Image (cartoon, coloured by chain):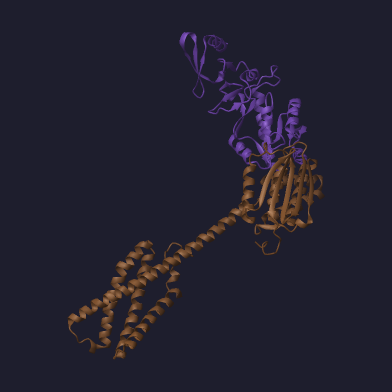
């Protein structure tokens, strides 16, 4: 069963989507939201598996909603009538989207993909984690100008502090998140992400090489030729962590 | 016009514009020469007449040969090379040829006049060559400049028609095209209504088709406010189905202003913007207020929506600039479009000279 929430500011658009979804017995509509505030509250409350999300809404866009959400993101299928900027972002990042009026065949395809993604995620990370930490296959929404990603946490190589912001490094990209490094660290699994120093958080699974450096400090080479230096104290903790 | 590549179009080969002036000119030349001979009182008028006929014929033949040379090289060479070739090669060569021909023909026609010595024959030929060179040179000068003038006229006409076409295309592009976001959202609304309220769905299809028809009628740049307001009303009714209670509409139209000519689909663009910024971006929506008045020979149309200018101005700048440009092109610099904000209400004011629909303007 896929629990889903419909987010669109137009009532008739939601009516239409609901009618289309009636033919899928495994899809259950938990709630409907007409703007971003309402949607954020309903998503926290219902923890849906899937959200159908309009882009252009009063006050804030669908992208704003994803940035605002705490915790693991549900599967997202964007629904839009026509939005050149959004379409470019979707094509670029292979995000799933539907065009209004929605073609039932496309809806079926999008649902199939969402189901298979949800299944792999369920296998990778056991549900009901008591800690509420983000697992490797949980995704976060990051945006860099016109480009945006629903990024699996496991793909992050390093997060660097930049004032109240954090720069997320992955696969040659480095978008900024409007959150502090320590607030991000709290949400990430400590067995995967290690605080290398005051301003850098590294993904231990992305470590490629470790060099001994001066007086007990370490030099860690990460995927994508990112080099991070560990102080003596942190180096000791790092050794301990890896020997576990 | 059809063949832009060749400098002298092939249609010019047997053009009356060449045959008449050239043949007529040489004929006049022969007649004037004969008249002069007669006035001077030459005794042997029959012989002079023969000589003049031969001369006129050879001039016509020679200049035609020069023209053939110009045309044959015109397909490949540049205009400058053609002129140089005509003057340095064509003129002296054909002048010599004709001088020889004239002398020969004269000798055949009137052998009794050519009993003089070889020496005088040679000097006579030389003089005739010189004379013919000046004659042909003058003719070629006139011909080349006539062609050049015609060519530049043609280029001017081409430039003007191109400019007109460009401006036409530009205006068409500036004219509010159907906004795809609006179109697809409307179709989605209609699809939902087909189930929920089939009668309202039918109504919506009618509204949409009227809007599309107005947008596609690109042959008219100006139309009466009455028609413009009609399209806008259909648009607002359709948007009301989409936004439901969020969109309220109030229209106060002065009947006296209904015949004023306004740029087609301009008001539509302004109302679309008002709905997008004033209604689409707020959760509770608001009212769109349209008012038109006729005052001191000017038609003033205002469109108001709740909201502020600062926040929502990204992206609209270009649309507004285009609307202004089009307004100025159609109605002159005197026409104005102003956007202002007062008490959380954004108002677009269109202030244009009240030109009446006199059936001449509207047809294009």
- Given residues B274 and A29, the one toward you in this image is B274
In percent of width and height, residue A213 lies at: 46, 12
Q: Could one spot residue B326 in this view of the protein? A: yes
Residue found at x 29% / y 77%: B98
In percent of width and height, residue B216 lies at: 67, 55
Instruction: Determine whether, in the image, residue A85 is placed left or right of residue B234.
Output: left
Q: How many marks?
A: 0
Is B287 above or below relative to B138? above
In percent of width and height, residue A44 lies at: 74, 25
Q: Colour of chain A?
A: purple
Q: Could one spot residue B192 in this view of the protein? A: no
Residue found at x 36% / y 69%: B141
Residue found at x 68% / y 53%: B352
- Given residues B155 and B28, the one toward you in this image is B28
Residue found at x 39% / y 68%: B144
Give the chain letter for brown.
Answer: B
């Amino acid at each position: 069963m896929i629990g889903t929430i419909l987010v669109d500011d137009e009532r008739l658009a939601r009516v239409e989507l609901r009618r289309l979804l009636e033919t899928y017995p495994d899809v259950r509509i938990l709630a409907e939201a007409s703007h971003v505030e309402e949607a954020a509250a309903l998503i926290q409350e219902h923890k849906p598996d899937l959200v159908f999300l309009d882009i252009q809404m009063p006050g804030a866009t669908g992208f704003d909603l994803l940035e605002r959400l705490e915790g693991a993101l549900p599967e997202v299928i964007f629904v839009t009538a026509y939005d050149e900027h959004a379409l470019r972002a979707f094509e670029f990042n292979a995000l799933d989207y539907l065009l209004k009026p929605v073609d039932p065949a496309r809806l079926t395809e999008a649902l199939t993909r969402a189901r298979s993604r949800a299944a792999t995620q369920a296998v990778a990370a056991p549900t009901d984690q008591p800690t509420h930490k983000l697992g490797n296959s949980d995704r976060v929404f990051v945006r860099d100008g016109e480009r945006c990603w629903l990024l699996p946490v496991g793909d992050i190589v390093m997060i660097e502090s930049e004032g109240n912001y954090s720069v997320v490094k992955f696969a040659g990209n480095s978008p900024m998140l409007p959150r502090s490094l320590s607030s991000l660290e709290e949400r990430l699994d400590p067995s995967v992400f290690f605080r290398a120093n005051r301003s850098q958080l590294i993904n231990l699974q992305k470590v490629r090489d470790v060099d001994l450096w001066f007086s007990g400090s370490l030099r860690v080479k990460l995927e994508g030729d990112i080099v991070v230096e560990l102080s003596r104290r942190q180096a000791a903790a790092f050794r301990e962590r890896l020997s576990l | 016009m059809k063949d832009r590549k060749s400098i002298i179009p092939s249609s010019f080969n047997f053009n009356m514009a060449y045959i008449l002036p050239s043949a007529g000119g040489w004929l006049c030349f022969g007649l004037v020469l004969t008249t002069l001979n007669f006035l001077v009182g030459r005794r042997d008028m029959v012989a002079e007449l023969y000589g003049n006929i031969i001369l006129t014929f050879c001039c016509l033949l020679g200049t035609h040969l020069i023209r053939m040379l110009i045309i044959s090289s015109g397909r490949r060479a540049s205009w400058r090379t053609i002129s140089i070739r005509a003057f340095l090669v064509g003129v002296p060569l054909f002048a010599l040829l004709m001088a020889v021909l004239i002398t020969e023909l004269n000798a055949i026609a009137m052998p009794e006049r050519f009993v003089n010595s070889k020496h005088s024959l040679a000097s006579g030929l030389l003089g005739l060559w010189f004379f013919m060179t000046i004659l042909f040179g003058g003719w070629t000068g006139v011909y080349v400049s006539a062609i050049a003038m015609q060519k530049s006229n043609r280029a001017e006409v081409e430039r003007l028609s191109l400019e007109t076409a460009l401006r036409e295309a530009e205006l068409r592009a500036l004219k509010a095209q159907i906004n795809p976001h609006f179109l697809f959202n409307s179709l989605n609304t209609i699809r939902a209504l087909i189930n929920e309220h089939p009668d309202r769905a039918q109504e919506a299809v009618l509204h949409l088709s009227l809007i599309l028809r107005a947008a596609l009628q690109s042959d008219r740049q100006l139309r009466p406010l009455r028609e413009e307001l009609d399209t806008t009303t259909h648009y607002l009714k359709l948007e009301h189905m989409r936004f439901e209670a969020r969109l309220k509409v109030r229209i106060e139209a002065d009947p006296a202003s209904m015949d004023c000519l306004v740029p087609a689909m301009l008001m539509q663009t302004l109302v679309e913007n008002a709905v997008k910024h004033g209604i689409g971006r707020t959760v509770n929506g608001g009212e769109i207020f349209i008012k038109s008045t006729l005052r001191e020979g000017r038609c003033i149309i205002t469109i108001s929506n709740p909201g502020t200018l600062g926040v929502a101005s990204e992206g609209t700048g270009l649309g507004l600039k285009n609307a202004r440009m089009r307004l100025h092109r159609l109605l002159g610099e005197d026409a104005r479009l102003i956007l202002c904000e007062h008490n959380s209400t954004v108002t677009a004011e269109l202030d244009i000279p009240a030109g009446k629909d006199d059936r001449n303007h509207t047809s294009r």
